[in-house]
Image: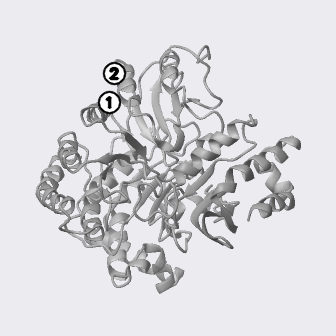
Amino acid sequence: MPKDYAAEFREDLKEFHEMTKKFYQKEVNIAEYKRFSGGFGSYAQRGGGSSMLRLRFAGGEIQKEQLLFLAESIEKYNISLVHFSTCQSVQLHNLSEAQVCALIEESFDHGIITRGGGGNYPRNVMCSPLSGVQEGEYFDVLPYAKAAADYLLGFIHTVKLPRKLKVCFSNSKENVTHATFRDLGFVATKEGKFDVYSAGGLGREPRMGALVASGVDPSQTLYCLKAMVDTFTAYGNYENRARARTRFMQDALGTDGYIKAFQEKLSQALSKEDLPLHVTIPEITKQGDGEFQPCTPQAMPGQVIPQKQKDLYTLHYHARGGSPKPEFFRSLYNAILPMEDVVLRVSPDQSLYILNLTASEVQELLPLTKDHARTLFETSVACIGASICQVGARDSQALLAACMERVRKEHFKDRVLPKIHISGCPSSCSGHPVAALGFRGGTKQTPDGPKPAFAVYEMGCALRGKENFGTELGIMPQSEIPEFLVELGREISKRGMEYQEFVEKEHGEFLKIVGKYL
């Protein structure tokens, strides 16, 4: 992060301290404080008795010195909850007034900016977490994501956006950042170019992105960003907040009309702006020490990922619900401190990837990740939930915990159940509309009155070329979801199948099981 941005935004922190003090003294209400504090990456938690702080990491990458800051902050302030968000940021929860004010200052001191972490601003720029090391990727898109993040910070003080702006980069067909249906997505192609998608998004009334430019040279990345900002400010809805996200511009202008509007702004940017982009593609020269051969403790299947660099590996770690134990961060820092070129990447599915490890280093780190997910199902994604989030309808984390506890008793084989995505409300923070099996918090009316419940979604997909928003099947009482998963897993196991095969070949049976609980 350039020092001039840090200095510029530091001037804003005095106002943050003053407003936060007023909030805790009950001089402003939760809604008023939310409208202000979100622009600083901080929100009051449900009930207004504590705060969270969202730390931005471009592309989800965390360097060693930043990990040390996290570890020291956790210890210094006795932080009880650290959460990896699906936008590749790190959230610190249950903070007092004094703690959130101190931490936001100290974050700036360590090159971690929180400005624009919420509110109507460009958000944390996302990137495929294995970019630069993944076998079969088209090219390393992370340097462009970092350049984009730096450029977008310049709009925080200069441009008033209708709503937030989410930008992401994808290095392969896996499309883990949802680049084809974000506000602006850069999708790498085999030709070494970008296909650019815009005006997509999840949440209420989701939309696939419109392909606004094809075969864009990566050197023109910043021009596309300028065109996006200009299009959003020209045609975005400043009157109706509920219709102010970029995806609704496809309704207002029509998809073809939106594409034309974007291309006009892109043409103007290319002719009038001077936005040179100079990036250096990092070269990993670290030498491995042989092929990884598992020994005790055994790695979970797929946990150790070979990199495209010979004899180097990435270690995948997924703590339940994206919230590692606070002491994990100090242990990890101590372990990787002497290891050359090791970096961390937060993934959009709330995992953590530890990159550039030799086989012996993998073996050394495995004991730190002993609570890693045992199956694909245990890598399930849940937003922070209504116990903390002001707008959440249901406690998605509590549901995930209940489901995992019940399912573990059945000892299903891996992939009998899929990775599920649980959102506490229609905001879709877990990505439930594009999950193989998704849940969205709501209420079910019963003869005994309203009951906590979740809408159930099936057969969503984020893979490039196969993108699909799932079908909503109905409302399921929250208390019955763990047993629904168990019955589903038993039926799939009885047939000797995996989940995906079952729903494709025996869809009628799947619907029968779901129907019992709706």
Q: Is residue 401 above or below residue 50?
A: above
Circle 2 Cα neighbour tier, 10 Å, few/some/many (<14 / 14–19 / ≥20): few
State left or right for residue 439 relative to residue 430: right
Q: Percent x, y for residue 487?
A: 79, 49
Q: Quadrant of residue 106?
A: top left
Secondary structure of the residue carrying tag 1 is helix
**Three-letter amino acid code of the residue under disc 2:** Leu
Q: Percent x, y for residue 349?
A: 52, 47
414 or 401: nearer the viewer: 401
State left or right for residue 7 relative to residue 393: left
488 or 59: nearer the viewer: 488
Residue 382 — which label? none
Circle 1 Cα neighbour tier, 10 Å, few/some/many (<14 / 14–19 / ≥20): some
**Three-letter amino acid code of the residue under disc 1:** Lys
Residue appearing at x 16%, y 55% in the figure? 9
Secondary structure of the residue carrying tag 2 is loop
In the rendered image, the residue lying farthest to the front is 448
So how many labels did they put on this image?
2
Q: Quadrant of residue 331?
A: top left
Lower position in the chain sequence, tag 2 or tag 1: 1
Would residue 190 be visible to someone looking at this image?
no
Residue at which label 2 appears = 337
The quadrant of the picture occupied by the C terminus is: bottom right
Look at the numbered discs 2 and 1 and tell me whether their residues touch, using CB distance below 8 Å.
yes
Residue at which label 1 appears = 64
244 or 440: nearer the viewer: 440
Spatial separation of the CA atoms under disc 2 and disc 1: 7 Å
Q: Percent x, y for residue 332?
A: 40, 26
Would residue 42 be visible to someone looking at this image?
yes
State left or right for residue 467 relative to residue 233: right
